[in-house]
Image (cartoon, coloured by chain):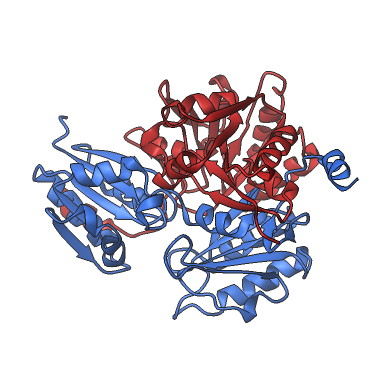
Chain colours: A red, B blue
């Protein structure tokens, strides 16, 4: 079947233009219509002045995709915009699930939130890591707990998306309890709010103390592994390089 | 202590300029000297024509950092370049470990290989995932196996970095055996070589069949979870949105 139109599912990264890939910028510029959650659309206003912009609320993902597919089926090129990477807890999956084979879909990757947060913390993701969303809106909470438990037992660095929101306050408390079974209380924890956006805040703390800091839906939480440490305020998970000879030379 | 100079640790993404963040481009342009593995330097030749470029071989990470710190200590601004995200199995950690407090270090995040590969496969990372490097050069193979086992038991999507090289052929075979204990043989597997570079190749196969395809050090392997499926050649891990009403409307 001939493809009648094209949909780009675009990850714009953290939000600031300096972390948005040129491919994302170009996809938006190539589009007749740009669709997204209103906060994200505000971050790309410089690109959409002459375009039809369709803003939608949170938790309306299926309706948003239906609208995108309807517009594309009428022959227009559409960008569906997510923050971070559209393929990581973004809109890529549901759009591909719902799209018929008359629509050409291109996923444009972006810098995901855990990468942005890690860069502000130092280098916490230098070794194997597990990414878990604490949102139980669509996922059984028992499965989420099981994943946190196994990731902790295997000493993964853990990155938590959607750690807390106004309506979900207890999940981060339970998650911490599960991690405490396998990880030391002194394990470094990085908490980054609005990573690589204006008003970014960065806290380096411990698993023991993490709940005494502000955590909300704009926050990424990264919990270290057994070897993670803090140096000059930076959280680092070593990969295992041996630089003792260098240190000895520098200190002699 | 006053910082005498600045080091940028820069992730350039997959390599093509269209996926390199403007912040990465700017960091390189701001630098007097650019240091990196020679393959990556070749990907940014457009930016380094008027700069001192220091090329180094693989597996010389400590020497490369020592050189960067020596140049920076002499007052020059240096970019240390990695492909993908410098904070994910890149150079950010070892540079921060070795740097003295006279050096200002800025980590510039990039699109990491698993994001690039996922976007070419479809949307395999829409749910919780674990990232494991199969390189046992610096990590005990027993720990790597334990992580793969726990990630499989908890039904994580799994992304494998460094799945195979000329000198490491058996790890991917063992990893698959471990995953087969907990994951169905029919689990979708995506294999992407040179993701978002020229000569990209994309294969969607199954856990049962994955070893019959070419896998090397330029390859990312993504293994789905229980719910992952293939539609129109795309690998999709659903997040759990309910779009049955939409399907019924479209098919009536």
- Residue at the (71%, 44%) spot, across then down: A94
- Residue at the (70%, 66%) spot, across then down: B179
Instruction: Evaluate whether residue A185 shows in this view.
Output: no
Which of these two is toward me, B163 or B25? Answer: B25
Above or below: residue B215 compared with residue A198: below
Which of these two is toward me, B116 or A238? Answer: B116
Above or below: residue A244 compared with residue A77: below
Q: Residue A144 placed where, x, y %?
A: 73, 41
Q: Residue A194 placed where, x, y %?
A: 48, 26
Above or below: residue A15 compared with residue A100: above
Which quadrant would the N terminus of chain A be assigned to in this image? bottom right
**Left or right of residue A29: residue B42:** left
Which of these two is toward me, B80 or A231? Answer: B80
Q: Residue A195 placed where, x, y %?
A: 45, 31
- Residue at the (68%, 64%) spot, across then down: B233
**Left or right of residue B157: residue B69:** left
């Amino acid at each position: 079947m001939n493809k009648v139109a094209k949909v780009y599912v675009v990850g714009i990264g953290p939000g600031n233009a300096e972390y948005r890939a040129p491919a994302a910028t170009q996809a938006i510029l190539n589009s007749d219509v740009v669709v997204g959650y209103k906060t994200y659309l505000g971050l790309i206003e410089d690109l959409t002045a002459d375009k039809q912009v369709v803003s939608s609320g949170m938790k309306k993902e299926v309706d948003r995709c239906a609208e995108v597919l309807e517009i594309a089926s009428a022959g227009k090129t559409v960008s569906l915009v997510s923050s971070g990477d559209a393929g990581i807890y973004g809109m890529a999956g549901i759009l591909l699930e719902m799209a018929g084979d008359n629509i050409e879909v291109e996923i444009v990757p972006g810098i995901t939130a855990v990468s942005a947060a890690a860069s502000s913390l130092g280098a916490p993701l230098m070794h194997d890591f597990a990414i878990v969303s604490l949102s139980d809106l669509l996922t059984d909470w028992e499965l989420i707990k099981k994943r946190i438990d196994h990731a902790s037992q295997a000493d993964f660095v853990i990155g938590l998306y959607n750690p807390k929101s106004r309506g979900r306050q207890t999940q981060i408390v339970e998650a911490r309890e599960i991690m405490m079974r396998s990880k030391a209380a002194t394990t470094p924890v990085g908490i980054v709010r609005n990573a690589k956006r204006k008003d970014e805040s960065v806290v380096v703390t411990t698993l023991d103390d993490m709940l005494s800091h502000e955590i909300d839906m704009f926050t990424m939480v990264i919990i270290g592994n057994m070897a993670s440490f803090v140096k000059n305020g930076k959280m680092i998970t070593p990969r295992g390089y041996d630089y003792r000879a260098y240190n000895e030379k520098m200190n002699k």
